[in-house]
Image: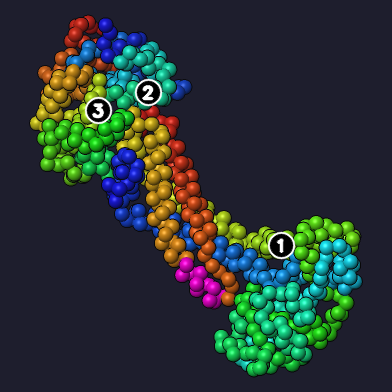
Amino acid sequence: MTGPITVDSLNHWFGNGEARIQALFDINLEIQPGKLTILMGPSGSGKTTLLTLIGCLREVQDGNVMLLGKPLRGATPKQYNLLRRRLGFIFQAHNLHQSLTAMQNVRMGLELHKSANTAEFDRACAHLLTQLGLGQRLDYLPAKLSGGQKQRVAIARALVGNPAIVFADEPTAALDKESGQKTVELLKRLGQVRGTTTVMVTHDNRILDLADRILRLEDGRIVHDTASTIHRP
Amino acid sequence: MSNLMMRLLGRIPLGWLQLVSNKLRFAAAASGVGFACILVFVQLGMMGAFSDATRLSYSGFRADIMISASDSHELFDGSNVARRRMYQALAVPGVQQACPLFVGMTPWQQADGSTVEFRTLGIDPELDSFFGPEMGDIEALKLGNSALVDRHARGLQPDLLSHVTREQPLKFEGLGQQLSIVGTVSFGGGFAGDGFMFVSNQTFMRLFASRFSGAPNHILLRVAPGEDVDVVARRVRQALEVPSLQIRSLAQAIEQDVKYQTTVRPTGLIFGFGVAIGIVVGIVIVYQILSTDVADHLREYATFKAMGYSQGYFRSVIIEEAIILAVAGFFPALIASLTIYAVMAKATGLPIEMGPDRALLVLVGTVASCSLSGMIAMRKLATADPADLF
C-alpha cells in the first residue's frame, strides 16, 4: 500500500531562458499516513517549492507526484480543484479574509463541500473554534484577534473539512515562541485524533521534537531524512 | 441584510461583506455608478423628448397615408406637392378622403420685445374628420384670420392664453396680419419652434402671400373602412408614379421622421453620443472600483483558490458585487433623474418623461455594464497559480 504522497524524480525550474534556475533536483519521496513530517532547510533550499508542488498550488513540470492516488503531472484545473478540496493548507501569514468573522472564515472551509446539511455548518465551525480556545471570539473580525488567535482560526479553517492531508508553510513564523509551540502542538494533536497526514515547512528549531520525521533540504536536494538516514552528497 | 443575502445566495455573501467592510469606498463606488446612471438618464431623456416632440406634431392627425415631396424629412421641411396629385390620389380605389396641409413659421412679437416662433399649420376646417380632439376648436377656424395657439408655447406668459375662447379672443399681429386667437391647444414646445399654431387654409394664404393654394406641403389621405393601408398606399404609389414624391403610411412617415431627428440631425446625434459616453464612464468607474477590489483581495482569493474554490465561485462573487453596486447606484440616480426631468421639462417645455421601460432599460444596462467590468477585473485571477499569488 502506497502512502498518501509519493514523489518520483521531481525537478522544478523557475524563470525562462537565460534566467532559468533549477529549484528542485530529482526529489524522490514517500510520506507515511497519519504522521507529522517536517521539511527543513535554509532559505532558498526549495522546501516551500516542494510543499507547493505536492500541495497542488503549483503545476508539476517534470517528474511526477502521486497525491491521494492521483497523478498531478498533467492534471486539469478541475482535477486540481477537486484534489485541493481534500487538503488543508495553513499559510505563513494566516491569510484570513479581513471582511469575514472568525466563524465565516472557518465556514469558507466547509462551503466547498456540497452538503445537503448546510445548517450543520455553523455548529461544526463553532465546535472546532471552541476546541481551539476561541469559543468567545466567534464573531470577531481578524483585525480584532491576536496573531496566535488568527493562526488558530486559520488552522480551524484548514481542518474543518476533515482533509486527508494538512500542509503548513511556516505556520509559526509570525508567532512568538510560546504561541508557536502551542499552535504546532494543537495541529499535531488534532492530526492524531483525526488520522490526518501533516506536512510542515519550518526552520523553527523549537518545534522539531514534535516531528515524526524530518527531511532536510539544501540547494534543491534532500540531504537528510530521519526515516532512512540516507545521506546524499 | 447579511443573513438575508446568505439565505438568497446559499453561501457566505462574500461580495457584500467585502463591499460594506470599506463603507467610504462603497459609497464612492455607488455614487460613481449613480453619476453614470444620471448621465445616461439625462441624455436618454433629451433623446426621448426629441422623439416624443416629433411624434407629438403628428398626434392631431387622423389620417392613414401622407403624400410628401421626396426631399421632406419632417413635417416642416421639403418642397411642395401639386394639388392635382391630391385629385389623382382621390381617384385611386380605396382612398376615401384627402386633405392638403400647409406649413410655415409665424413670429409673434411679445410686449417685452421677445419673439415667440410658431410652427404654423394651415388646414381645412371643413375636413374636421382628419383631426382629433387634440386640435381643439377647429370649427372656430372657419372665421377669417382666426388661429388656435399652443398655450404651453415657450416664451409665452404662463396665463396669457388660459381664458381665451371663441367668445373671448385675443388679438395679435403676425406677418403683417391681425390674427385673433379663438382657442388653444396643448402640444408644448418642440426643438424647431416654440409652439404650434393652427389656421385655416385661407388664413394661411393671407399670412404667407408667396404661397399658392395649389401647392400644399403635404397631402393627408384616409382610406375607406376595411381597406388595408399598405395596400392602398402601394396603389397610390403606382397611380401617381412621380419620383419627386414619397407616399408613405402616416405611421411610417412618423417613424422615419423620428429616425431622422435622432440619427441624422446633429442634435439627435449629440444625445446619442452622450448616452454612449455615460455608459463608457460607468464601465470605467466600475472597472476601477472592482479591479482595485480584486487587487486588494488577491491574497485572500488566492487562499480560497488554494482551498479548492473554482473560477466560477469568484465569478459569482464579482457578479454579486457588480449587482450590489448597480442597485446601490441606480435607485438614488433614478430619484435624482426624476427631479432633473421635472426641472428640465419646466425649463424647456419639452415632453421629458420617465417611462418604466426606460428605467428598466437603464437598470438592466447598469447591471450588465457592472458585470462586464467585473469580469474584466477578474481576468488576473483566472490564470495565476495560487502559489504565485501570495
Specify the principal SS of the magenta part. helix
Q: Nearer the viewer, mark 1 or mark 3?
A: 1
Quarter of the figure with the N terminus of chain A: top left
Q: Residue at x 35, y 10 (%)?
A: A9
Most extreme residue toward the front is B226
Q: Residue at x 34, y 44 (%)?
A: B8
- Say what secondary structure mark 3 lies in: loop
Mark 3 highlights which residue?
Answer: A161
Give, as a three-letter code, the residue at label 1.
Ala
The location of residue A124, given as percent across then percent down, is 19, 33
Q: Nearer the viewer, mark 3 or mark 2?
A: 3
Mark 2 highlights which residue?
Answer: A80
* Residue A71 drawn above or below residue A104: above
Quarter of the figure with the C terminus of chain A: top left
Mark 1–mark 3 distance (CA, rounded to whole Å) = 67 Å
The location of residue A211, given as percent across then percent down, is 15, 17
Give, as a three-letter code, the residue at label 2.
Tyr
Q: Is residue B262 magenta?
A: no
**Magenta stretch?**
B338-348
Label 1 marks a residue whose chain is: B
* Residue A66 drawn above or below residue B279: above
Q: Quadrant of residue A94?
A: top left
Give, as a three-letter code, the residue at label 3.
Gly
Q: Nearer the viewer, mark 2 or mark 1?
A: 1
Q: Nearer the viewer, residue A125 or A172?
A: A125
Q: Quadrant of residue A218?
A: top left
Number of residues whose C-alpha sits closer than 10 Å to that of mark 1, classed few (under 14), some (14–19) or many (20 or more): some
Left or right: A73 in relation to A211: right
Examine the rendering and report whether any part of residue A182 can be seen.
Answer: yes
Mark 1 highlights which residue?
Answer: B251
- Give the label on residue B242, or none: none
